[in-house]
């Protein structure tokens, strides 16, 4: 597919998505709303179009990478349980550990797939309340994260590029 065709498809998709979101939030088709909404959608699409042209997004995940999301509900539930357990121990006088840890990180390149792996790992893993990714140090090949109680690096994060932890 040519760049022009891909860009046209992105603009059409973005226009439809913004219009649908705007209508969903407004939920009203009065003329006054249309006078404001239509220019807002056009300006938003123009801004997005020129931003994409100037700063090409190099985010190229595979379907396998995106599908790691299915593990997230379990990580949220287990993370809440872990936080509750730490809170219970804190209430009886045993202070939380508050650990700053590092795990090996392997996809350190600048191509779209490595960028997608880093982005998805940070986004997916940080949703769970017991695991906060501080950042990924590409020079040293480390993923830096914070936990209140030590646990293993989630399988989801390992499949996106992290090692098992240190």
Image (tube, helix red, strand yellow):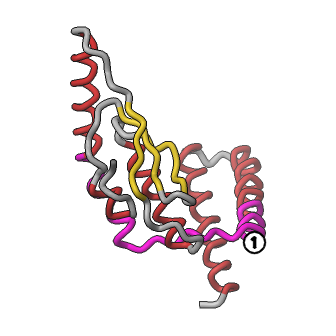
Placement of 81 over or under 54, stated as above or below: above
Q: Percent from the top left, x then y, of residue 21?
A: 56, 52
| Quadrant the N terminus occupies | bottom right
Rendered residue at 34%/71% (across/down): 64
Rendered residue at 59%/65% (across/down): 16
Kind of element beneath mark 1: helix
Q: Percent from the top left, x then y, of residue 35?
A: 76, 50
Mark 1 crowd level (few <14, some 14–19, many ≥20, 10 Å Cα): few
In the shown orientation, is residue 110 left or right of residue 101? right
In the shown orientation, is residue 84 left or right of residue 124? left
Q: Quadrant of residue 87?
A: top left
Q: Percent from the top left, x then y, of residue 153?
A: 31, 49
The stretch of residues the image draws in magenta is 46-74
Q: Is residue 57 magenta?
A: yes
Q: Nearer the viewer, residue 83 or 30?
A: 83
Q: How many marks?
A: 1
- Disc 1: which residue: 53
Q: Quadrant of residue 67?
A: bottom left
Q: Percent from the top left, x then y, of residue 54?
A: 78, 69
Rendered residue at 39%/63% (across/down): 161
Placement of 89 over or under 112, stated as above or below: above
Placement of 106 over or under 34, stated as above or below: below
Q: Nearer the viewer, residue 76 or 149?
A: 149
Q: Is residue 58 magenta?
A: yes
Rendered residue at 62%/65% (across/down): 14
Placement of 90 over or under 122, stated as above or below: above
């Amino acid at each position: 597919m040519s760049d022009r065709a891909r860009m046209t498809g992105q603009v059409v998709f973005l226009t439809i998505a913004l219009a649908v979101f705007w209508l969903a939030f407004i939920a009203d088709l009065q003329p006054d709303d249309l006078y404001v909404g239509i220019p807002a959608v056009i300006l938003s699409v123009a801004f997005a179009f020129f931003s994409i042209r100037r700063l090409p997004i190099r985010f190229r995940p595979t379907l396998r990478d995106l599908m790691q999301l299915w593990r997230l509900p379990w990580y949220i539930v287990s993370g809440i349980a872990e936080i509750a357990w730490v809170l219970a121990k804190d209430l009886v006088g045993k202070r939380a550990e508050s650990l700053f840890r590092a795990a090996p990180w392997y996809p350190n390149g600048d191509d779209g797939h490595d960028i997608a792996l880093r982005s998805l790992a940070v986004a997916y893993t940080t949703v769970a309340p017991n695991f906060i990714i501080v950042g990924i140090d590409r020079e040293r090949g480390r993923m830096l994260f914070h936990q209140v109680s030590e646990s293993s690096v989630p399988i989801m994060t390992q499949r996106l590029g992290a090692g098992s932890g240190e």
